[in-house]
Image: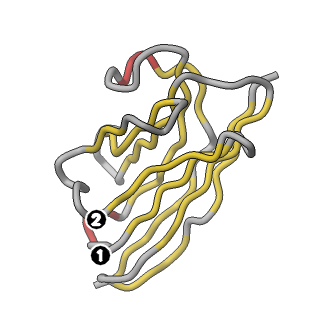
Amino acid sequence: QVQLVESGGGLVQAGGSLRLSCTASGRTFSGMGWFRQAPGKDREFVAAVTWSGHSTHYANSVKGRFTISRDNTKNTAYLQMNSLKPEDTAVYYCAATHMGINIPNDYTYWGQGTQVTVSS
């Protein structure tokens, strides 16, 4: 049974940092990604990384502030979020894919989500 478990969300002031973790169990994946959904908005792509860790992809809104990485020995992906802004407030979801990392619809497995709140 495949399971993705996120952790690391919380409340932080604008300009602060948080690191999200997502640990997968059940199997390995070719890519892992992070998505987010703010109240009243559609879910949007944030960042993704390939199994090797050599290829990453970011939404324009987080480039230069967020860094995605993964540790295959732990089957875990991380999202380091720096210079956080109030508009980053959302529920962040981890997702995994057996295909390419650039197509959101290719992500098959999803975590339960973790809340990130950035106060101004």
Residue nearest the viewer, comparing 37 with 14 = 14
Q: Work out how far the residue at label 1 is from the one at label 2, CA to CA, in angstroms.
A: 6 Å
User: Where, by quadrant of the figure, is residue 65 drawn?
Assistant: bottom left
- Neighbor class of circle 1 (other Cα within 10 Å; few <14, some 14-19, many 20+) is some
Amino acid type, label 1 = Ser
Which residue does the image show at 60% across and 25% down from the upper left? Answer: 109
Residue 100: assigned label: none
| Residue with the mark numbered 1 | 83
Q: Position of residue 16 (x, y in %)?
A: 38, 82
Q: Position of residue 57 (x, y in %)?
A: 31, 38
| Residue with the mark numbered 2 | 65
- Neighbor class of circle 2 (other Cα within 10 Å; few <14, some 14-19, many 20+) is few
Q: Position of residue 93 (x, y in %)?
A: 51, 44
* SS assignment at label 1: loop
Q: Quadrant of the C terminus?
A: bottom left
Q: Position of residue 32 (x, y in %)?
A: 52, 34
* SS assignment at label 2: loop
Amino acid type, label 2 = Arg
